[in-house]
Amino acid sequence: MAISKRSLLALTLCLTPLISPSLQAQSPLEKQELVRRQLATHQSHRMLLEGRKAYAKGKYGTAYRTYKKALTNLPIGTATARLQKSLQQHLSDAAVAYGQALTRVGKYQEARKVYQEAIKLNPSSSQKVKRLTRYLNDPIRTNPALSSNHLRNVDQVRRLLYKGEGLYNLGLFDQAEKKFYQVLRIDPYNKASRRWLEKVCLQKSAYYRVARNHTRSHLIAQIVSSWELK
């Protein structure tokens, strides 16, 4: 949040009665800097609370970025030492959770970057983060061929199969058939879609047999009725 010089001067005048006589003897520039640091500290504390809420909701990326911004903007000094330590710890926890979330969706490069930044901003978390990095670099535990695009395709295939099954249960076989063919365009070797297409074909074939028998009976009835004496 940008603060104009005029706002800083106004806040300085408001806070002047609360400042000790030794601070009142400071120059206006020093008082302005003091107010700026107080505002930055307050803002960092507010972002700490926002990060906690995001973390509790499972939004680890949002929490990580919020903690990082709060720690970057926090004025460093003895007065803010406790807040700085708290932010570093929260940042470390959020980085671990966020990195693991990125790993699960195949975003390995982004996960490595998060781990490196976590070590840089909080050296006390280096052991845990290094262990996760070794896990990330292990081709046996982590599939290097996995990508975020592949996982998106998996989710899309799952949704299409559910939609196709729903349409099949409603008797909308043509629409269900289109959904299952969309699955095959994404995953050509998907066996579930092939099985559903087989079921659709059986249902349509059964209908065509009934329709054929009905049409045959109707035509025979027309031929027979033509011999009726009027």
Image: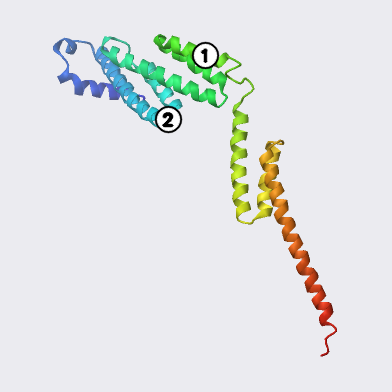
Name the residue at 24% across, 23% down: 11
> In the image shown, does 229 or 63 lie closer to the viewer?
229
| Quadrant of the snapshot with the N terminus | top left
Name the residue at 67% across, 54% down: 173
Name the residue at 48% across, 15% down: 115
* Residue 78 percent location from the top left of the image: 27, 9
Left or right, 29 with respect to 209, comes to left
* Residue 73 percent location from the top left of the image: 37, 18
| Quadrant of the snapshot with the C terminus | bottom right
> In the image shown, does 42 or 20 lie closer to the viewer?
42
SS at circle 2: loop
SS at circle 1: helix
Left or right, 63 with respect to 184, comes to left
Q: Which residue appears farthest toward the bottom when viewing the image? A: 230
> In the image shown, does 165 or 175 lie closer to the viewer?
165
Cα separation between marks 2 and 1: 21 Å
Image quadrant in which you'd find residue 3: top left
Q: Which residue is mark 1?
A: 133
Residue 58 circle label: 2
Q: Residues within 10 Å of mark 2 (few under 14, many from 20)?
A: some
Q: Is residue 163 above or below residue 97?
A: below
Left or right, 27 with respect to 152, comes to left
* Residue 218 percent location from the top left of the image: 78, 73
The three-letter code of the residue at mark 2 reads Gly
* Residue 221 percent location from the top left of the image: 80, 77
Left or right, 197 with respect to 223, comes to left
In the rendered structure, which disc, 2 or 1, sits on the residue that comes first in sequence? 2
The three-letter code of the residue at mark 1 reads Thr
Evaluate whether residue 3 shows in this view. no
Name the residue at 40% across, 12% down: 122
- How many labels, in total? 2
